[in-house]
Amino acid sequence: MARVLSLSVLLLLGFQAIGQSRDEPLKGQDLHRRPPTADQLKAPVTVPRGYAVVIGTSAFKNLSKDDWLPFAERDAENLVATLIDKEAGNFEFENVVKLTGERATLENIRNTVENWLPSKAQENDRVVVFFVGHGVVDDAGRGYLVPYDVDPGRLAETAYPMDRLGQVLSERVQSHRKILLVDACHAGKVSPASSFLRINQSLSALPQVFLTLVSSRAGERSYEDPQLGGGAGAFSYFLTKGWQGDADVDPKDGVVTADELLTYVKREVSLYVRERGQKQTPIEFGDFPDDLVLGYSSSRRQKISASLPELSNGSITVEVNLEGVEVSVDGQRQGTAGPGNPLSIPGLSSGTHTVRGSRMGYEPVSIEINVAPGASQTVSLRLLIQRSVKPSAKALYDEGEKIWRTSGASKADLKRAADRFSQAIKEQADFSLAMLGLCRVQQAQEQTHQALETCRRAVMTDDDFVEARSTYSTLLMESGDYPEAVRQLQRAALQEPKNSEVQSLLAEALFLADRPKEAEVAANAAIALDDSLPQAYLLRAEARRAQSRFEEAAEDYRQVLELQEFGSHFVRKVAFWAIGMGLTKNRSGRRVIYISQAESAYFGLCAAENGRENYQRAIAYCNRLLGYDKNDSDAYIQLSEAYTGLYNRDGGRQNLLHTKENIEAALRVNPDVDKAPQLKSKLREIAELLSSSR
């Protein structure tokens, strides 16, 4: 009988030291390194390109709910946010593949680890592979990673071998420097006879060309705490915290190295778990250069003084007097606290930190504290001043809002609304609701840069203003910064996990970031929260069509049409939430914003039926779309593809003529349409075919 252990694995590969060649001997092996000079801190830091695979599974297709893991996917999400954070991991968003939940199948894991990663990672690249979920050891002692679709009775066929992972990483991933971190969680409900010793033996048998850090010694449990960061494993929690900068102490220079991270994680995990009456001691083996660069923060680097703090870290407990207070430390969100529900923040680097508490409708409170090495202290944040709105500011806001909500507002009306909102902000500088109103009007006036800044001010004023954060994210989408939009919406989803609109917007941002599989997951979450939300079905349809799952996409497009007759009032509502709603991917490139989601659905149905080779249906749907807008170049292109398909299948001069007519129509209404050269080339080909068929 297989022995199942809960396992989370993080592989960090190829973080080369700044300014150090591969053949250069390691320096600075003494306990304390010299603090950087002012000139050194001013010098630019080159962060190598990074690739990451993040895998997290909480629920499993073939395991009982007793064996599901409550924090695995949250750990994965937190790591992704840290990796793509421009003040932490500095990974490009498009270089991070996330496989969570139902996407963490054996096929996806195998394809990503064995094909995508080796094809991308080069010699000096940073590579991260993070797995959090169950691990399993069979009777022969062979270790496996457990995917979502594992069959416990058929491990060899349905689980991913640990030794295979080691082989791929050591022989096929070109990065020279590799680090393996393993967080093993207790899984007695799955197999009480399981032993951590055997899984550690599987890990110790991996190639020794990289460092391995195991979360605990044999016989020790990997500690999990529902109160830690909203629920997390201690090892994964401190790994993320250290990466975000708390490990940056030796020297404190804005750069987190492998040596700093390992020292931090081992110390903080042991201390945190010991204080709770348990024992967990991370251990390491293997070889590595101790100054491999894992993370970097330019803003933190700018603030660092010439003196170094002591290496030991401290912790704080934040108490508040109101429910739902957002707590941040040095601008990094830590979680939510309430009366009787204090927030524990362990592992803070020694020195000065700014702790901030905020809640919509109250003046935020900030306290500067000095964290002493190894000490714990309680911080009380009392939000006492209820933010009142001046009557004069409120009157101006109400007038601007009334103008804005008028359907079909003219340019003059929009200018009047913007003036009222601007005057309201002048009357009261912290009037975040007026900032949001102004932001929306500026967007409607196509003043994207100004709108971005105004919405950013609203979010900075009220950190828990989810509606402002959502609108800010749509503007980021409109400006093309999809990774930052995803990051903002992930934070909004943590703040309001039951908000279906936020999940729908997250699906849109992920889709625009060329992440259709993850977009589908977010759309599923939105639909689970509100199955009458048409935009969620629309985004799921787009994501499925991008994966060539045309039949499922067509079902979702039809659901959109059934749910809503989209009139001007609804379009106005969309402008509040989803500025980018209706953006679609197809062979002609990214579409412009549609007047209504009905048009999005008809276009999607046309493209999906083309994908299914149901050309007559495609033609019917595209003609419906042209009934809304006769100048839709993409509709003409889809029609040309449908008639091309009919010609290739059935022949017929008439099909060639229709293909020609629709390509000419697309070029007439939009001469600069994407792939215009290819379309013109196709016209020449059609002309030759028509000439030869006379």
Image (spheres, rainbow, N blue to C red):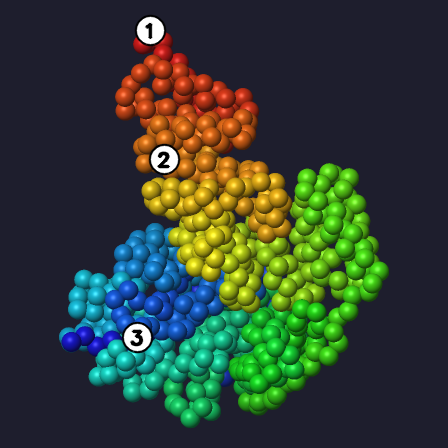
The answer, for residue 39, to whether it is visible in the render is no
The structure residue drawn at horizontal position 83% and vertical position 63%, both measured from the top left corner, is 391
Residue linked to disc 2 = 609
Give the image location of residue 77, x and y in percent. Answer: 45, 65
N-terminal of the pair, mark 3 or mark 1, is 3
In this picture, is 23 found above or below 368?
A: above
Residue 694 has which mark? Answer: 1
Picture quadrant of residue 356: bottom right
**Residue at 57% over, 89% down:** 376
Q: Is residue 515 above or below residue 200?
A: above
Location of residue 297 in the rendering, given as x and y in whole percent from the top left corner: 58, 66
Q: Is residue 323 left or right of residue 486?
A: right
How far apart, in angstroms, are the residues tagged by discs 3 and 1? 71 Å
Q: Secondary structure at mark 3?
A: helix
| Residue type indicated by callout 3 | Asp
Mark 2 and mark 1 lie on one chain; the one further toward the N terminus is: 2
Looking at the rendered structure, the kind of residue marked 2 is Glu
Q: Of 44 and 584, which appears nearest the observer?
A: 584
Sequence order check: which comes first, mark 2 or mark 3? 3
Residue 152 in which image quadrant: bottom left
* Side of 202 relative to 595 (left or right): left
Q: Please say if the residues under marks 2 and 3 sit with CB atoms less than 8 Å apart.
A: no
Viewer-proximal residue among 196 and 532: 532
Label 1 SS: loop
Residue denoted by label 3: 67
The kind of residue tagged 1 is Arg
